[in-house]
Image (cartoon, rainbow, N blue to C red):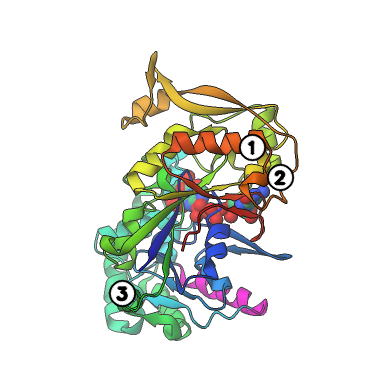
Amino acid sequence: MPALVLLGAQWGDEGKGKATDLLGGSVDYVVRYQGGNNAGHTVVVGDQKYALHLLPSGILSPGCTPVIGNGVVVDPSVLLSELSGLNERGVDTSKLLLSGNAHIITPYNVTVDKVTERFLGKRKIGTTGRGIGPTYADKINRVGIRVQDLYDESILTQKVEAALDVKNQILTKLYNRRAIAVDQVVEELLAYADKLAPYVADTVLVLNQALEEDKVVLFEGGQGTLLDIDHGTYPFVTSSNPTAGGACTGAGVGPTKISRVIGILKAYTTRVGAGPFPTELFDEDGEALRRIGGERGVTTGRDRRCGWFDAVIARYATRVNGLTDFFLTKLDVLTGWEQIPVCVAYEIDGRRVEELPYSQTDFHHAKPVYEMLPGWNEDISKAKTFADLPKNAQAYVKALEEMSGAPISAIGVGPGRDETIEINSFI
Ligand code: GDP
Ligand code: IMO
Ligand code: MG
């Protein structure tokens, strides 16, 4: 039995960290399969708040083994400082497993990310500046550095040389920057080798053996469906596959092993960075969602763009991920509106469109078609069962479920672990 995937159904920041942490107590492994420290996953345990960027949220559950899979890109300095930060707060991180095949975010990848964005000017993606795109580009170009390369100085030097050959030409001739010295990079990377060594493992073997032994493995996505390099709002996306298929390639587990795919779905919509967003609000409602929902980026501190729930996107997420369930988050944030608009379709050049258009041009022109749902005023943060919710909140959840195409199996009514209504059990 079971391998579960938990992923973002929108543009990230849906509450994946909280949902993963909630399940962490009942699973044996939590695995990050893509992305890197562009993620910011918030977990609130009692009066303690943790912001995790690279480590799987399962690290906070003592019985659970956290795994960084081959599909992740790893900035060693960030990993080590995240580990020591948790150790200082009394969290045991010794069980962490790090794939030897995961790619390393080198200092030059971070530089290239930043200068490329600056060069793009108005056309910039609004990346997190963490070197994610350039590191995945190196991986695809077959000039990437992997964790295992830290343990062979000669290979590491050759690979850094190969990568910098071209990059230094670009940095000096195109961007007017200073060239980066191979020796300096190699020295910096080698300094991480011993510190990371205790964690490095053949994670593919470990995870497949665990599944054969009927252990429960949870794959925790970073980012979200609409930020997927293939299925998202390209080019305003991240450079990996947060969608369900990414869990297979990013961890080395076959699709036949996956029994459940849970989409984390915010009761409204947010986005950070550039790109189209049909239900975005520029008025006081948008301001109120941002204020009440605390919609400020965990990684970059940028204000998140806010808008109403978009059922077209939710349906799309159900389809491309094969979602079996939704975990609806932040329903409490919607308390106090008399009526809540929900986008049920788009109008594109005078046509009503029910599904996400594949054409970037069409999506840029998409105008939301709203249905108004009645709101509620009661405080719902103490609700423990679906029946505890006011009738209009129940109707809102039911309407979203109907429009989105998969059952809503849990509802978040606050950031804490216990501020959750569980409807169907996940495991
Ligand atoms: P992630 O990147 O998907 O893990 O999400 P983030 O942590 O970036 O953003 C989600 C924010 O919402 C965090 O501050 C969470 O603590 C918070 N949160 C998660 N679920 C709920 C919920 O049901 N209600 C409220 N009010 N906050 C929530
Ligand atoms: P979590 O896991 C929201 C966005 C960036 C930018 C685009 C590309 O917390 O949901 P990148 O640095 O990945 O090349 O940036 O993707 N982005 C996120 N937005 N939540 C995230 O992660 C994100 N990770 C990247 O803002 O628009
Ligand atoms: Mg986040």
Foreground of the two, 140 or 13:
13
Mark 3 surroundings: few (<14), some (14-19) or many (≥20) residues within 10 A: some
Which amino acid is tagged 1? Ala
Q: What stretch of residues is rendered in magenta?
A: 75-90
Residue 178 visible in rendering: no
Magenta span main SS: helix
Q: Which mark is drawn over residue 25? A: none
The quarter in which the N terminus is drawn is bottom left
Query: Does the magenta run of residues contain 81?
Result: yes
Foreground of the two, 227 or 330:
330
Mark 1 surroundings: few (<14), some (14-19) or many (≥20) residues within 10 A: many
Residue 288 visible in rendering: yes
Look at mark 2 in the image and give the residue it sits on. Answer: 380
Most extreme residue toward the top is 350
Image coords of residue 373 (percent x, y):
60, 27
Mark 2 surroundings: few (<14), some (14-19) or many (≥20) residues within 10 A: many
Q: Disc 1 on helix, strand or loop?
A: helix
Look at mark 3 in the image and give the residue it sits on. Answer: 208
Most extreme residue toward the left is 142
Earlier residue among tags 2 and 1: 2
Which amino acid is tagged 3? Asn
Image coords of residue 350 (percent x, y):
39, 13
Q: Disc 2 on helix, strand or loop?
A: loop
Kindly report the distance in space between the C-alpha atoms of the residues bearing marks 3 and 1.
Answer: 42 Å
Q: Do the residues bearing badges 3 and 1 touch, measured as CB atoms within 8 Å? A: no
Foreground of the two, 229 or 203:
203
Residue found 40% across the figure and 37% down from its top: 315
Look at mark 1 in the image and give the residue it sits on. Answer: 393
